[in-house]
Image (tube, helix red, strand yellow):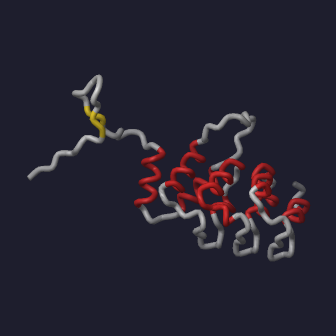
Amino acid sequence: MSTTPRPVISEAVKGADKILHPSKFRMTSLDLGLKWRATTGSCGLWAAARACAEVPDRDPLDDTLTPAEDALMVMLLAGANPCRRNNLGELPMHWVESKRGTKILADLGGLETINAIDQHGKTPLHWAAEIGQTPKAQMLIRLGADLLKRDSDKNTPADVAKKFRH
């Protein structure tokens, strides 16, 4: 008994004799999300978060997603856990680099991680202050990040920003 592959979508209007099949050459963001969910590896979420970098000279009214932001959103919508830590105790909220990526993580389940600490006691706001990610820091503050939380060296995010001249 041979099984023939079923068509994904049949067109009912013009071109009803044609059957649409998924492309073999392009991977869509939905395919990426489903493939990520099928595998148990979680490094994809951190990679997508890290790739969400600020786009220079972006129009503030432009709401189109970059490919990294799109991948991050699809992974979260497909069931990725934004509260899962890596082996160093870091969360995707620590790794995300852009204001929009931070907002996507917060909106899709990661809001409770904005004050979470890594193994060095640093919050995502400490990371943003250390690296000089001003837009990310502003978004974290708008979302309610604790400005007075101290890391293992007893520094607040403001102390860290001053130390690294940001």
Q: Quadrant of the C terminus?
A: bottom right
Q: Which x, y percent locates residue 116?
A: 70, 69
Query: Does 100 sit left or right of 18 as displayed?
Result: right
Give above or below for 11 relative to 22.
above
Query: Horizontal and vertical percent for residue 154?
Result: 86, 75
Residue 13 vs residue 121, the one in the foreground = 13
Please state the horizontal and vertical placement of residue 87, each as a whole percent of the image. 60, 73
Q: Residue furthest front?
A: 13
For the image, the number of numbered tags is 0
| Rendered position, 72 above or below 116 | above
Which residue is at the far top? 14
| Residue in the image at 59% along x and 63% along y | 82
Q: Relative to 120, is 12 above or below?
A: above
Find residue 133 and report its horizontal and vertical position in percent: 78, 52
Q: Is 64 located above or below residue 103 in the figure?
A: above
Quadrant of residue 43 within the rendered picture: bottom right
In this rendering, would 27 be left or right of 20?
right
Q: Residue at x 30, y 35 (%)?
A: 20
Which residue is rendered at x = 40% and y = 60% of the image? 38
